């Protein structure tokens, strides 16, 4: 590894991360389709792909650790590797959410699923992940900021599901277990948005050197001061 230029190694690790993100997103969207149609065969495939994602996540982490040990990077190169490792962890967790969704498949009917806008939520959350990865590739802080701003839209959708589930639970014909399953699926999609936001904040750290793990005026003012 040490015989190659550092920038080539970082570019290669970044490329592996992008490939992993594509695989994670594809599996996540497939999980929404599978649960909608109660597709047992697709559910098996999703679990198999998740195992591949887990292995890829471990492999990329090991390669990053080897890079740190052999290259001992500083400044931007060090931040890039740290960012890759953190994004790698978030992608693995998004991969787990796909499995959580299909785990709910036996508990919820297609008819119940049709009464919620989970596909719309999923597309929105998926776009957030895509844009956060694009922000990483292009080192675009503005795009990362946009992703963070979109998180509220996912939260609004999730709150709407919560209110609807709460209302339906009060009806005489309510199937509580099924409604809880629906609420869980909404929560998994909302968590995907959270992970996309975390990725975007790691991009902000990469570009600015400022850690933005928590929202607040202090961080907002500090970031704005960097632009002055």
Image (cartoon, helix red, strand yellow):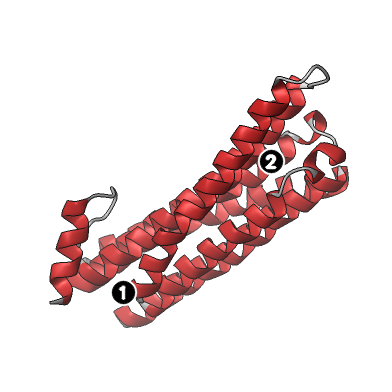
Quick one: which residue is furthest to the top in this view?
172
User: In x, y percent, where is residue 194?
Assistant: 46, 49
Q: Element type at marker 1?
A: loop
Q: Which residue is mark 2?
A: 101
In depth, the one of 176 and 56 nearer the eye is: 176
Q: Quadrant of residue 137?
A: bottom left
For label 1, count other residues whose C-alpha is less than 10 Å away and answer few (under 14), some (14-19) or many (20+). Answer: few
User: In x, y percent, where is residue 141?
Assistant: 32, 72
Q: Quadrant of the C terminus?
A: bottom left
Q: Is residue 38 left or right of residue 24?
A: right
Please determine whether, in this image, residue 139 is positioned above or below residue 31: below
Nearer the observer, disc 2 or disc 1? 2
Q: Which residue is mark 1?
A: 2
Image point 80% across, 16% down: which residue? Answer: 172
Q: Is residue 124 left or right of residue 48?
A: left
In depth, the one of 110 and 195 nearer the eye is: 110
């Amino acid at each position: 590894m040490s015989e190659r230029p550092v920038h080539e190694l970082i570019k290669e690790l970044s490329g592996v991360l992008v490939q992993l993100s594509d695989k994670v997103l594809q599996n996540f969207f497939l999980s929404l389709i599978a649960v909608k149609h109660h597709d047992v065969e697709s559910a098996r495939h999703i679990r198999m792909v998740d195992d591949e994602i887990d292995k890829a996540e471990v492999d990329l982490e090991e390669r990053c650790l080897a890079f740190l040990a052999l290259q001992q990077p500083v400044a931007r190169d060090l931040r890039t590797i740290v960012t890759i490792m953190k994004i790698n962890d978030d992608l693995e967790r998004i991969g787990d959410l796909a499995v959580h969704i299909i785990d709910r498949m036996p508990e919820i009917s297609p008819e119940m699923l049709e009464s919620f806008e989970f596909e719309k939520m999923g597309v929105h959350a998926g776009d957030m992940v895509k844009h956060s990865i694009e922000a990483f590739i292009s080192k675009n802080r503005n795009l990362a900021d946009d992703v963070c701003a979109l998180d509220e839209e996912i939260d609004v959708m999730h709150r709407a599901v919560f209110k609807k589930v709460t209302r339906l639970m009060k009806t005489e014909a309510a199937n509580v277990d099924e409604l809880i399953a629906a609420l869980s699926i909404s929560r998994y999609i909302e968590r995907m948005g959270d992970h996309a936001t975390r990725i975007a904040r790691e991009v902000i750290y990469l570009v600015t050197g400022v850690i933005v793990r928590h929202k607040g005026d202090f961080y907002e003012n500090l970031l704005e001061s960097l632009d002055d």
